[in-house]
Image: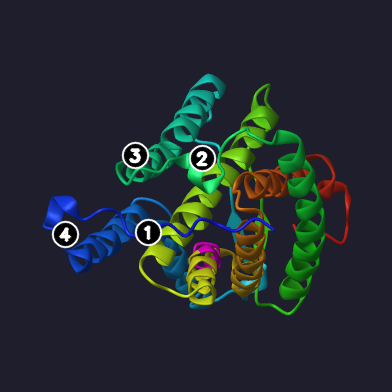
Amino acid sequence: MAVVDEGAVPSAGGLGGDPARWRTLLRFEVLVVLALSFGQSAVYSFVSIIAKLTAKQALSSQKAGLNAPQSARPWLDFTYQVLDLGFSVAIVALVAYLLLREGASLRTIGFDFADPARDWIRGALLAAGIGTAGLGLYLAAHALGVNATVVPTTMPPSWYRDGILLLDAFRNGVTEEVVVLGYLLRRFDQLGLSPLKADLASSLVRGSYHLYQGFGGFAGNFVMGMIFCRAYRRWGRVMPLVVAHGLIDAVTFLGWIHIAQHLSWVPK
């Protein structure tokens, strides 16, 4: 059984050998990374759910949209979409730099192509299980009135729509799993959190930036986070979770366009 390299606290040689100060800097580093990425999304998500709960409509009657068009002009929209995809992965470059500073790398958290066949098999199996359970939880939460109607995309038909959505799905997999899973668990371990507390903290972050969808979205992604954390600690690689996340989102985005519109039992 593979075990995640929890990593020692980085050398404090440049700070007079003061481990306490290093831990303070690590806490600050984590806050900065989150403020530039999913922590920021969590704050906006919290405001969004408050707005939905204080609206005159029932939560299940409101919509939570993803992947909206950014211009009515196709080539301009395509340009904006590509730019958004490109700049959004900069957070992965930042994490890579921060890992290199401590003498580690993205390979340390298993973000590489060292074992693609096994990564894809594990990821596909995990995606099938979590995706099926997640759909059931979403339908139940929506029926109970505790989740908004999730609209995976409002992009109109175009020559680039499906390709952009596919890239967006795997962009989500890369950024979320590298940052919220691999990076955060490594830093939480270095800061002395127990594996359970680290997993809970990572999963709470994951759930919080999906709160804009409703309480079902929060709960579903929290549970998904706990499962991903356990899988990551067992396998020692983030890549299967990148694959799983990318496949789940790809089926959600493209399935909404090509399948869900023909199913009467899917909320629209």
Between marks 3 and 1 in the image, the one whose residue lies nearer the viewer: 1
Label pair 3/1, CB-CB below 8 angstroms: no
Residue under label 4, please give it. 17
**Cα gap from disc 3 to disc 1, whole angstroms:** 17 Å
Q: Residue at x 67, y 25 (%)?
A: 158
Residue under label 2, please give it. 107
Q: Is residue 129 magenta?
A: no
**Cα gap from disc 3 to disc 4, whole angstroms:** 22 Å
Q: Which residues are the magenta region?
A: 206-211
Going from N to C along the chain, the mark reached first, 3 or 1, is: 1
Residue under label 1, please give it. 8
**Res 41 → quadrant:** bottom left
**Cα gap from disc 2 to disc 3, whole angstroms:** 12 Å
Query: For the residue labelled by badge 2, is the local secondary structure a helix, a strand or a loop?
Result: helix
- Residue 267 in sight in this render: no
Going from N to C along the chain, the mark reached first, 3 or 4, is: 4
Query: For the residue labelled by badge 4, is the local secondary structure a helix, a strand or a loop?
Result: loop
- Residue 94 in sight in this render: yes
Going from N to C along the chain, the mark reached first, 2 or 1, is: 1
Image height of 214 relative to 209, above or below? below
Q: Residues within 10 Å of mark 2 (few under 14, many from 20)?
A: some
150 and 61: which is toward the camera: 150
65 and 20: which is toward the camera: 20
Quadrant placement of the C terminus: bottom right
Colour logic? rainbow
**Cα gap from disc 1 to disc 4, whole angstroms:** 14 Å
Image position, residue 59 (x, y; %): 61, 73
Query: For the residue labelled by badge 1, is the local secondary structure a helix, a strand or a loop?
Result: loop
Which amino acid type is shown beneath numbered disc 2? Arg
Going from N to C along the chain, the mark reached first, 2 or 3, is: 3
Residue under label 3, please give it. 97
